[in-house]
Amino acid sequence: MEMCLDPQATIGGGLYIAHIGGVHINPQAIIGSNCDIAHRVTIGASAMGRKGAPVLGDRVYIGTGATLVGKIKIGSGAKIAANTLVMSNIPDGATVMGVPGRIIMRAPKPVESPAPPVAETTDAK
């Protein structure tokens, strides 16, 4: 299997490609740091007339056979399941699967700690 990583693509440090083969990355794609891409993955424009290329955040996982097309943004920490077709923006920390890709899990919202109690002041005269 071939691999097509165009030198014009912007790729952050720590990219891991498991089982190199069949990976195609569009020259306009932007890939964040510490991403993990399985084999037979396509990141880029398509023959369906979709313009532009995907922008991936940091720590994105893309499973075997997944395809990301068009000018879309994949949020940091997102997970794309095997054989998923992604054609729309994905928020940070979401897990996506299916054709077309649907969000099946979202990252939990951070729990805000309650404000400390305010001490009452009394003026002693």
Image (cartoon, rainbow, N blue to C red):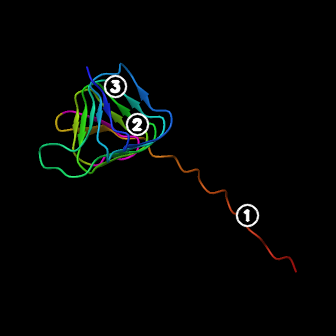
State the CA–CA distance, disc 2 to disc 1: 45 Å
Secondary element at tag 2: loop
State the CA–CA distance, disc 3 to disc 1: 56 Å
**Residue at the spot 38% in from the left edge and 40% down from the top edge:** 7
State the CA–CA distance, disc 3 to disc 2: 11 Å
Secondary element at tag 3: loop
**Residue at the spot 48% in from the left edge and 35% down from the top edge:** 34
- Which label's residue is closer to the chain start, 3 or 2? 3
The segment highlighted magenta reads 89-98
Mark 2, Cα crowd under 10 Å, few <14 / some 14-19 / many 20+, is many
Q: Which residue is mark 1?
A: 119
Q: Looking at numbered disc 1 in the image, what kind of residue is underneath it?
A: Ala
User: Does the magenta stretch mainly form a helix, a strand or a loop?
Assistant: loop
- Residue 96 in the image: state x and y as whole percent: 29, 36
- Residue 9 in the image: state x and y as whole percent: 37, 43
Q: Which residue is mark 3?
A: 38
Q: Looking at numbered disc 3 in the image, what kind of residue is underneath it?
A: Ala
- Which label's residue is closer to the chain start, 2 or 1? 2
Q: Looking at numbered disc 2 in the image, what kind of residue is underneath it?
A: Val
Label disc, if present, on residue 60 of the rendered structure = 2
